[in-house]
Image (cartoon, rainbow, N blue to C red):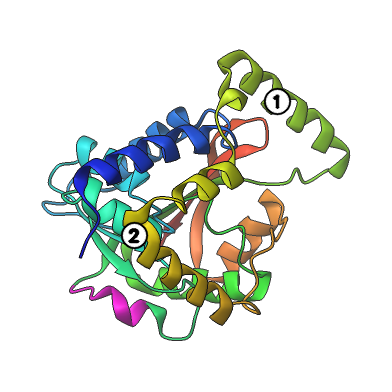
Amino acid sequence: MGVSMDTAKLWVERWELQQQHYAIAREERFTVIADVVEHVVAHQDRPLVLDLGCGPGSLASRLVARLPDAEVVAVDMDPVLLELGRAHHAEAARYVDAVIGDSGWTDALGLDRPLDAVVSTTALHYLSERTLLRTYRRLESLLRPGGALVNGDHFAPDDRRCSELTAYVGRRRAERSRTHDHEDWDAWWSAAAQDPELTDLFAQREKRQAALANHGGNDNDLTLTRHAELLEQSGFRGITPVWQCGDSHVLVALKG
């Protein structure tokens, strides 16, 4: 039995606020990602977009609002977030349960044609450098010529001496927007776990986490330059950041 629409709405809305606690200028970053995708797919009748680490459909829902003709395939490994997305943003995407970077993970996507764009926000930093390189290579092979990978995330400065500066700028932005007043990650998950409608999903989540205990999960702390190097090694060209606030960036890489 799926989650009711009312329950999904409650937890997705709280998720949106909770994520603002961490992602600097989150809504602006979403908008920039949509700008890039809009430009890349301008001449495509039915653009196909892959959303990596989709959570409950935050980015996917914003993309289809901007590009209603787009088909979005949204992938995540968390059963709680996937079910919330299916219930609250059902029309935004086709949701797929898969572990990004695992062997054969893209087989589960059911793609019937080359991708026009791949997007992600704060989802790839948990992959090890080796897994990230393998993932970038696989995504490059799935994109059509001229397609783009668009990654919004927090990237460490190339000069580590600048870390305090970018962190300070981001912190001051958060203070002005009062996003740190929202509940944090642990509070959201603790509260959601008490909802009877989500009990079975949390049981599935615990089993998944146990199975992936040695899969990684820590921040790879890669710099913007290192991401660009890995993307170039994967065959991407036209690699450039198009937006930055503090240490939050939108990095774009074009195929061919």
* Residue at figure coordinates x 47%, y 34% from the top left: 29
User: Going by the image, does 164 lie left or right of 83?
Assistant: right
Residue behind mark 1: 171
Q: Amino acid at mark 2?
A: Leu
Kind of residue sitting beneath label 1: Arg
Taking the view exactly as shown, the residue that stands out farthest to the right is 161
Residue 117: tell me if it is visible.
Answer: no
Please tell me which of labels 2 and 1 falls first in the chain.
Answer: 2
* Above-or-below relation of 158 to 114: above
Q: Which residues are magenta?
A: 106-112
Work out how far the residue at label 2 is from the one at label 1, CA to CA, in angstroms: 30 Å
Q: Quarter-wise, where is residue 124 in the image?
A: bottom right
How many neighbours does mark 1 have within 10 angstroms: few (below 14), some (14-19), or many (20 or more)? Answer: some
Q: Residue at x 55, y 72 (%)?
A: 209
Q: Quadrant of residue 167?
A: top right
Q: Which residue is mark 2?
A: 82
Q: Quadrant of the C terminus?
A: bottom left
Return the residue nearer the eye: 43 or 86. 86
* Residue 191 visible to the viewer: yes
Query: Relative to residue 4, is residue 99 depicted above or below?
Result: below
- Tell me residue 32's x, y (percent): 41, 34
Frontmost of labels 2 and 1 is 2
Say few, some or many: other residues with alpha carbon within 10 Å of mark 2 (under 14 / 14 to 19 / 20 or more): many
Q: Say whether residue 124 is magenta.
A: no
Looking at this view, is 231 or 122 the one in front? 122
| Picture layout, residue 110 above or below residue 95 | below
SS at badge 1? helix
* Side (left or right) of 108 relative to 219: left
